[in-house]
Image (cartoon, rainbow, N blue to C red):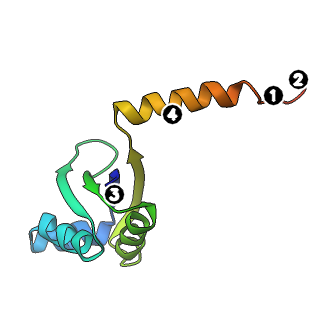
Amino acid sequence: MPKYLATFTYSVGSWARMTESPGDRIEAVRKIMEAIGGQLECMYWCAETEDGLTIADFPDSVASGAVQAAMFKTGAFQSIDVKELINKQQLQAKLVLARDAGQVYEAPGQSR
């Protein structure tokens, strides 16, 4: 199953609610992911520009996007950015395809 990294930033309202009533956010995230066929691998909070991140497996980008949209529409987040992660073999295949595609691509203003 493809693996995805999501970084997120909570809304001010979410921080206010969590401060007043801390709960198990990991379990809430796990439930929504599993409801759509995904599986949470890990969740961390950050001390940088994002508030946290998750790494999860999803059947495809449609499923990961559905979870992103469902969570974002609640207003609990300022941002949720999702990226598909690739492994070493996928990177190597990508580079081979890029090399092959580069053989036929004509940059603007150049002809072969």
Name the residue tied to disc 2. Answer: 110
Name the residue tied to disc 3. Answer: 9
| Amino acid under disc 2 | Gln
The reply, left or right, for residue 73 in relation to residue 95 is left
Question: Could you say which is closer to the camera, residue 61 or residue 45?
Answer: 61
| Amino acid under disc 1 | Ala
**Residue 2 locus on image (x, y percent):** 35, 52
Q: Is the residue under label 3 in contact with that under label 2 (CB below 8 Å)?
A: no
The reply, left or right, for residue 38 in relation to residue 101 is left
Query: SS of the residue at dot 1?
Result: loop
Counting residues from the N terminus, which is met first, the one under dot 4 or under dot 3? 3
**Residue 112 locus on image (x, y percent):** 88, 21
The residues bearing labels 2 and 3 have C-alpha atoms spaced at a distance of 43 Å
Counting residues from the N terminus, which is met first, the one under dot 2 or under dot 4? 4
Q: Which numbered dot is residue 107?
A: 1
Question: Could you say which is closer to the camera, residue 6 or residue 74?
Answer: 6
Question: Could you say which is closer to the camera, residue 11 or residue 7?
Answer: 7
**Residue 85 locus on image (x, y percent):** 37, 43
For image coordinates 22% across by 71% down, the residue present is 34
Q: Dividing the picture into quarters, in which one does residue 64 lie?
A: bottom left
Q: Is the residue under label 1 in contact with that under label 2 (CB below 8 Å)?
A: yes
Q: Which numbered dot is residue 94?
A: 4
Q: Which numbered dot is residue 61?
A: none
Q: Is the residue under label 4 in contact with that under label 2 (CB below 8 Å)?
A: no
Above or below 66: residue 43: above
| Amino acid under disc 3 | Thr
Query: SS of the residue at dot 3?
Result: strand
Which of the two marks, 4 or 3, is nearer to us in this view?
Answer: 4
